[in-house]
Amino acid sequence: MELNSKAENNAKNHNVQTLILYLLFFYFIWALKELWFIDYFHLFGETAYALLEATAKILVWIVPIWLYVKYDLKIKPIDYFNMNVHVKKGLFWGIILSTLIGLRFAIEVYLINKETFHFLLPLDSYLDGFLIVGITEEMVFRGFILKEINSRISF
């Protein structure tokens, strides 16, 4: 009985240590990217910059937690992040709500305010703002960090 409790404590400590190491690695690498690499990304032009920025975010944010979940926690990442639950329902409601918000915005700008709207944002803003941010931040913060903290500390 005592051996089982020691083994559980050692496993829990190992998981906490691994989680802390991951967080330190994550923030160190992301700070390095934001403070140093970003200057070099701009040298390649607007389109290449957008693609490099998106690739860097995926490599720093998603790949390490995917590997951690798969190899350290030994859980399929798709199951761990519940990416196979209510996919069709989520897409349906996402499309419906996005369309309603877009219509509301178009009515307000064009019909009520009688203004024109121009999409003059660079490709980076579209990629990062509409696609990458939602996926990466939800997976890292809500899907991983919050879930791991919640498993160790009950709220």
Image: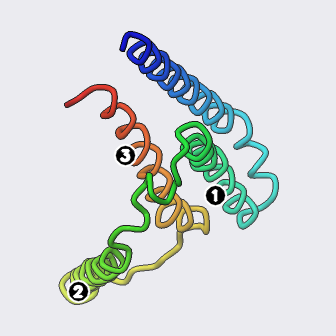
| Disc 1 element | helix
Q: Amino acid at mark 2?
A: Ile
Label 1 crowd bin: few (<14), some (14–19), many (20+), radius 10 Å? some
Number of the label disc, if any, that sits on residue 54: 1
Residue drawn at (70%, 43%) of the image: 38
Residue under label 2, please give it. 107
Which numbered disc flags the more N-terminal residue, 1 or 2?
1
Query: Of circles 1 and 2, which is in front?
Result: 1
Q: Amino acid at mark 3?
A: Arg
Q: Amino acid at mark 1?
A: Ala
Which numbered disc flags the more N-terminal residue, 2 or 3?
2
Query: Is the residue 67 above or below the residue 48 in the image?
Result: above
Residue under label 3, please give it. 142
Question: Disc 2 vs disc 3: Cβ atoms closer than 8 Å?
Answer: no
Residue 35 location, x and y as percent?
66, 33
Quarter of the image where one finds residue 127: bottom right
Cα separation between marks 1 and 2: 32 Å
